[in-house]
Amino acid sequence: MAKKSAAATPGNVAAMPVDDVAQPNFKIEYREIQAFGTLKNLPLGIEDNVRSSSVEALNQVLADTMTLRDLYKKHHWQMSGATFYQLHLLLDKHYEAQAELVDSIAERIMTLGGLSVAMAADVAELSRVPRPPKGREDTPSQLARLLEAHEMILRYARDAAEEAADAGDSGTDDLLISEVVRTNEMQVWFIAEHLAETSLTRGEG
Ligand SMILES: [Fe+2]
């Protein structure tokens, strides 16, 4: 039974006894309950080897998507030049869509019984997207760098979707095509159009 707290009078706040039931116990010994790279057994009707392949592929897409998401924020902040305002806004819109993809992919991995990669250092180890400089790049470089990451993700996601479909994991196939591929394709269009040489008006003579 918990000890009775010492009576507090106005101007005299008494410390709660450490074993009082209302006292949160935050001196916890951290305990890992599932190792990264292991699969929980779930009644999904999908073979373990199929779930394992899907989890591995989805973690690659996840790490690359988290990197692209952060690349969008970097360029949203570091944009410069005459098109600053429109690109500043557009890149943040794309960032939001990539952040939603991150959550969908990560939760698909958990749904399959796996563990999604989560923290920046682990993502950096896994991602294939080239690391940009800490400094600011000019606008064409920023846009080209985003397109490079999009293409890597698109190529990988289409192949992974096909493998998942062939193996009977249609849920993963659907996520990769309906969400990852479709979103990335649309964003490629919006970014790539900014790199066309056309201008608003034709110069005279
Ligand atoms: Fe912002």
Image: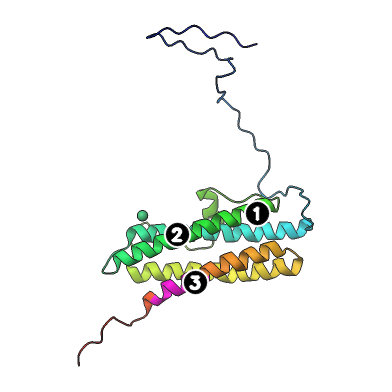
Kindly identify the residue that appears in the image at 68 percent across and 71 percent down: 162
Residue for badge 3: 186
Residue for badge 1: 109
Give the Cα distance between marks 2 and 1.
21 Å
Disc 2 + disc 1, Cβ < 8 Å: no
Q: Nearer the viewer, residue 119 or 107?
A: 107
Whether residue 43 is situated above or below residue 139 in the rendered picture: above
Colouring style: rainbow
Looking at marks 2 and 1 on the same chain, the residue that comes earlier in the sequence is marked by 2
Whether residue 55 is situated above or below residue 141 in the rendered picture: above
Q: Amino acid at mark 1?
A: Ile
Residue for badge 2: 95
Magenta residues span 185-193
Q: Amino acid at mark 3?
A: Met
Residue 6: x and y in percent read 50, 7
Give the Cα distance between marks 3 and 1.
24 Å
Q: Image quadrant for the N terminus?
A: top right
Kindly identify the residue that appears in the image at 42 percent across and 11 percent down: 13
- Classify residue 44 by image quadrant: bottom right
